[in-house]
Structure formats: structure tokens, C-alpha cells
Image (cartoon, rainbow, N blue to C red):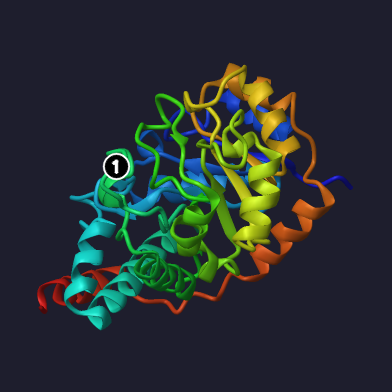
């Protein structure tokens, strides 16, 4: 038995269409990712996550979402709690390190409890990119700090909180998007820093958390390693920087391959990312013709990817069963306590 294919798809709306259902049944993706266009009320979301898994015949197919806090939250008020951006938690940590670390973990627990209740078991957070003067606004306040140690401490606390409530974190964007000066959704960032600088800064934010189960690549050119190819499609970046320099042996997802930083057709992008060493491709647009192209260019998880995925799945913890509303109140008190 070959197992699922090395791709995770977004879908077009809050319910599967007949064409999507037929496509997904045949394409057998590893999992799915949800966006605002997919989200109704809590019952609607639970129905969609159940339907997605039923369509591929795997009750453990992962369902992902971007729920970071601040402006990157798919689940938003008034139906869901407001939450601080990473930079706000970083500022709290600068004033009171213990309070900042506690708030980061509480935020992770709150999101984990929310998502677990909806059938969403992977959160594409925390962001471990550095917040530097030149950092593109596309990252901006999604970064905790310019200091790698602070980023690791707070990102690790959020990841721990998520896992306490049964939700797997995804550290992103490896090996670091903080030096990118343009938005990779729209164009290709290029980083000119030398490897010694990157080792001491960007990579240092990820290295202490290299044992976490899931990571996401960056569509960024690192000129000191590979001046031709973005990290997502660079064997050098993945093997030398992510796997060796950072020491990450978890399951590596691409960032959304529909982003404009990459070139080629969706299928060509998928092929290039898998050939470079990514374990699975993330395609988010929900456009069926693009999804068909991607599906025609991916195959079952490689042996090494399947090993990493099984290890990641085994890292999922039994939820502690916290009430996210109570955690929201606790987080508010922590943020206002200094």
C-alpha cells in the first residue's frame, strides 16, 4: 500500500463541491489547510474537517490552519477571541521575561484548545523569523524579536502550549525569512548575508527548537548558499542549512507553492520542491485546475518523509482539555499584568 500523496490542499469554500470531492478522493492528499473562505460557525467547521477526512478515508489526515495571533488569524472576533501579535508578546518579554514566556504558552494553549474542538490538529505557528529593521511588513509584527534567543524561548513556549492541547506546531519559515525585504507572496526575496552571520542569527532562532515535529520552508534566495534557487526548491538550502546547520529532522512542508516568489506551473513547482528535499507540498489557492496540475506531479510520501510524518504524528499529545475562553481570560490578565 503506497499511502497518501506528498501534498496538502486548500479547498474553495465552506463545503466541498462535488468536483472537489471526486478530485480529493482520487488525489489522496496527505492533508488539508483551511483559510477564512472555509470558515463558518463552529458546527460548520467541524462538519468540513470531518468531511475532508471522510473523503480521503483517513480519520487521521491532518487539517492545518494559520492561527498565529495579531493580523494572521483565520479564526477571528467576534466568534473567536482576539489575540496579540508575536511582537506584543516579545515586548512583554523584554519587560518581564517570565511573563512573556507564560503569555506565549497560554496563547498556544488557547489556540490549541480552540482548534482541537473544531477538528483542526496542526497550527502553522510559531513564526521564528527575526524581526529586523529591514524585515518586510509581510513578516513585521509576526516576529517576536530581533534577538534569536528571545525568538526561540517564546516560539518554544507557544509550541509547547499548542502541544499541551493536542495541536502540532509548525515552525516557520526555515531557515529564516527575517532578512527578506520583500513579500514572498508577491516577489522573490534575496538575502545577501554571509553564512557566518546567518549561523549566529537567523539559524540560531531555529536551532534550539530543531526537535519539534513540523517545519515550513521559506521562498527566499540565500545567496551565500545557493544564489540561483529559492530555499523551497534548493537542495543545498534544505540539505546544508535546514537539515545540517539547523539540525532539523522533522517533517518539512513547503510554504504555499502558489506564491509569486516561485516560478513555473503549479506542477513544476511541486516537482522542484520535492526533488529539493521537502517532504510534502502545500498548495493553498483552492483553484481546482491548479490542484489537478499539482496532483499530477506528486507521488506517495517518500520513505524518509513517511518516517518523519509518522514520528510527527506520534508527537501529538492527548489534549489537556482546557476551555479556550478561560485561557483567553488568563492571557488578557497576563498581558495587562505589567
* Apparent side of residue 85 relative to residue 45 in the rendered image (left or right): left
Question: Residue at position x 20%, y 50% from top?
Answer: 77
Question: Residue at position x 31%, y 38% from top?
Answer: 136
Q: Front-most of 151 and 227?
A: 227
How many marks are shown on the rendered structure? Answer: 1
Above or below 36: residue 104: below
Considering every residue shown, the one lying at the far bottom of the view is 98
Residue 149, given in percent of the width and then of the height, sits at 39, 70
Q: Front-most of 153 and 106?
A: 153
Q: Report the residue marked by disc 1.
A: 134
Question: Residue at position x 55%, y 31% from top?
Answer: 257
Residue 26, given in percent of the width and then of the height, sits at 74, 30
Q: Secondary structure at mark 1?
A: loop
Residue 161, given in percent of the width and then of the height, sits at 41, 73
Label 1 Cα crowd, 10 Å radius (few <14 / some 14-19 / many 20+)? few
* Apparent side of residue 310 relative to residue 159 in the rendered image (left or right): right
Q: Quadrant of residue 326?
A: bottom left
Can you say which quadrant of the picture contains the C terminus?
bottom left
Above or below 233: residue 60: below
Above or below 326: residue 41: above
Considering every residue shown, the one lying at the far right of the view is 1
Question: Residue at position x 67%, y 69% from top?
Answer: 314
Q: Front-most of 293 and 257?
A: 257
Q: Is residue 321 visible?
A: yes
Q: Is residue 120 visible?
A: no
Residue 222, given in percent of the width and then of the height, sits at 54, 39
Amino acid at each position: 500500500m503506497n499511502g497518501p500523496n506528498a501534498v496538502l490542499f486548500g479547498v474553495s469554500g465552506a463545503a466541498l463541491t462535488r468536483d472537489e470531492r471526486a478530485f480529493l478522493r482520487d488525489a489522496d492528499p496527505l492533508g488539508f489547510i483551511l483559510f477564512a473562505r472555509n470558515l463558518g460557525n463552529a458546527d460548520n467547521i467541524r462538519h468540513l474537517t470531518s468531511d475532508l477526512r471522510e473523503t480521503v478515508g483517513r480519520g487521521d489526515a491532518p487539517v492545518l490552519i494559520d492561527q498565529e495571533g495579531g493580523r494572521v488569524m483565520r479564526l477571528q472576533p467576534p466568534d473567536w477571541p482576539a489575540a496579540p501579535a508575536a511582537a506584543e508578546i516579545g515586548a512583554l518579554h523584554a519587560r518581564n521575561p517570565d511573563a512573556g514566556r507564560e503569555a506565549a504558552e497560554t496563547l498556544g494553549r488557547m489556540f490549541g484548545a480552540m482548534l482541537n474542538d473544531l477538528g483542526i490538529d496542526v497550527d502553522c505557528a510559531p513564526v521564528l523569523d527575526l524581526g529586523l529593521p529591514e524585515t518586510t511588513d509581510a513578516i513585521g509584527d509576526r516576529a517576536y524579536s530581533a534577538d534569536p534567543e528571545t525568538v526561540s524561548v517564546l516560539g518554544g513556549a507557544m509550541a509547547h502550549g499548542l502541544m499541551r492541547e493536542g495541536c502540532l506546531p509548525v515552525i516557520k519559515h526555515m531557515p529564516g525569512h527575517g532578512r527578506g525585504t520583500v513579500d514572498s507572496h508577491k516577489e522573490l526575496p534575496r538575502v545577501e548575508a554571509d553564512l557566518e552571520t546567518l549561523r549566529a542569527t537567523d539559524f540560531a532562532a531555529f536551532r534550539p527548537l530543531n526537535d519539534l515535529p513540523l517545519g515550513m520552508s521559506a521562498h527566499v534566495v540565500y545567496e551565500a548558499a545557493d544564489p540561483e534557487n529559492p530555499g523551497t526548491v534548493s537542495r543545498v538550502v534544505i540539505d546544508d542549512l535546514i537539515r545540517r546547520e539547523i539540525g532539523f529532522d522533522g517533517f518539512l512542508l513547503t510554504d504555499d507553492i502558489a506564491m509569486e516568489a516561485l516560478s513555473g506551473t503549479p506542477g513544476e513547482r511541486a516537482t522542484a520542491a520535492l526533488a529539493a528535499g521537502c517532504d510534502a507540498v502545500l498548495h493553498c489557492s483552492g483553484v481546482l485546475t491548479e490542484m489537478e496540475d499539482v496532483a499530477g506531479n506528486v507521488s506517495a510520501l517518500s520513505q524518509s518523509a513517511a518516517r518523519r510524518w509518522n514520528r510527527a504524528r506520534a508527537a501529538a499529545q492527548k489534549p489537556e482539555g482546557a476551555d479556550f475562553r478561560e485561557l483567553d481570560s488568563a492571557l488578557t490578565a497576563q498581558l495587562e499584568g505589567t
